[in-house]
Image (cartoon, rainbow, N blue to C red):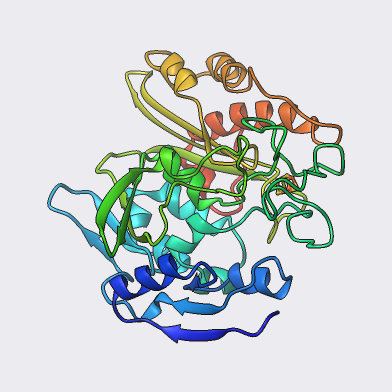
Amino acid sequence: MNNFSYTKIKELSDASVLLKDHKGNKAIAGGTNIVDLMKYFVVEANTLVDLNGISGMDALTETETGSVLLGALMTNAATAYHPVIEEKYPLLSRTILAGASGQIRNMATNGGNLLQKTRCYYFYDPHVPCNKREPGSGCPAVKGYNRIHAILGHSQDCIAVFPSDMCVALAALNATVHVKSAEGKRQIDFEDFHRLPGNSPEIDNNLKEGEIITAIELPNEDFSQNYSYLKLRDRSSYAFALVSVATAFKIENNRITEARIALGGVAHKPWRSHEAEEYLKGKSPDREHFAQAAEIILADAKGFKHNRFKIKLARKAIIRNCMMALEPDSQRPGAKPSL
Ligand code: SF4
């Protein structure tokens, strides 16, 4: 870890200027990823700009339209266990609790969850090339050990995946990201927040320099009846997803009126297929239709030497999770779905 200075900021505009005008400065909130990155010499900060002194960003508020604003500085744990989230957005609660550990969720913030870095092993090793860490240096993962890497949306320059669980639900729930800088504020549709690697994998998202996430808005939509999150990983706790699936349905008279399916662990961003969701509209909720939706989602999937298994795994996970969404009781801890 390099020597650095630290400052705790009270005004968002001051933080924005410090982060925009001084490229070596880095923001910190919960610190659950940035501190690791600094310890591994992946990130070197001149000054750590602590956002925790900014007021009004650490709570949940309900708007007049019935949507919910999650403060960017609110912790993942406080969000997952908030009564409004448990009641209105149980899919989000479920995904958050599938991630990391209790200790980390107590520290990690909602804004930080969106900004965490890939866990590609090469990215964390400054002794090897990596286009994301050092643009133009190459991507050893393409021909190297790529078990945890992408099967969708990758490029020849980067095949990393985005590791968040929470963001898979935020994608499925059509969230909106509120951002602010010294120049003003704007909102970004969640699907447009993270980006695919293309030929500039060093850019993870569409935040502009100096912009700070202030809140994440959840629309006033009811997906609290039929939902499920399935996370498949190498061990049952404290591991990142090889493949995960968030599914939510609205169902009337045994017909799907609205479907949401988002995948994690398979691409550089949470992966949604509107084509598959459209396909399911008006269909009966059964295995045959879910299998066809899985085919649509994975039609362009391409694996590498060590991760081709993920395509088959994702297909099974999509079908299984869609079936689990029909059984709300299967979401209880320890419950076994009858599949
Ligand atoms: Fe770096 Fe992306 Fe390649 Fe991993 S997959 S080594 S993050 S360029």
> How many numbered marks appear?
0
Image quadrant occupied by the C terminus? top right
Q: Is residue 139 above or below residue 75?
A: above
Percent x, y for residue 300? 64, 19
Question: Residue 281's quadrant in the figure?
Answer: top left
Percent x, y for residue 218? 31, 48
Instruction: Identify the residue at horizontal 60%, vertical 38% (top origin).
Output: 337
Instruction: Identify the residue at horizontal 27%, vertical 39% (top origin).
Output: 221
Q: 22 left or right of 311? A: left
Question: Residue 252's quadrant in the figure?
Answer: top left
Residue 326 visible in image: no
Residue 198 visible in image: yes
Percent x, y for residue 7? 45, 85
Q: Is residue 263 above or below residue 176?
A: above
Instruction: Identify the residue at horizontal 50%, vertical 40% (top origin).
Output: 228
Q: 20 left or right of 195? A: left
Q: Nearer the viewer, residue 182 or 29?
A: 182
Q: Nearer the viewer, residue 105 or 150?
A: 150
Q: Nearer the viewer, residue 227 or 17?
A: 17
Image quadrant occupied by the N terminus? bottom right
Q: Is residue 310 above or below residue 136?
A: above
Percent x, y for residue 255? 37, 17
In the picture as drawn, the residue positioned furthest to the left comes out as: 64
Instruction: Identify the residue at horizontal 55%, vertical 41% (top origin).
Output: 269
Q: 141 left or right of 6? A: right
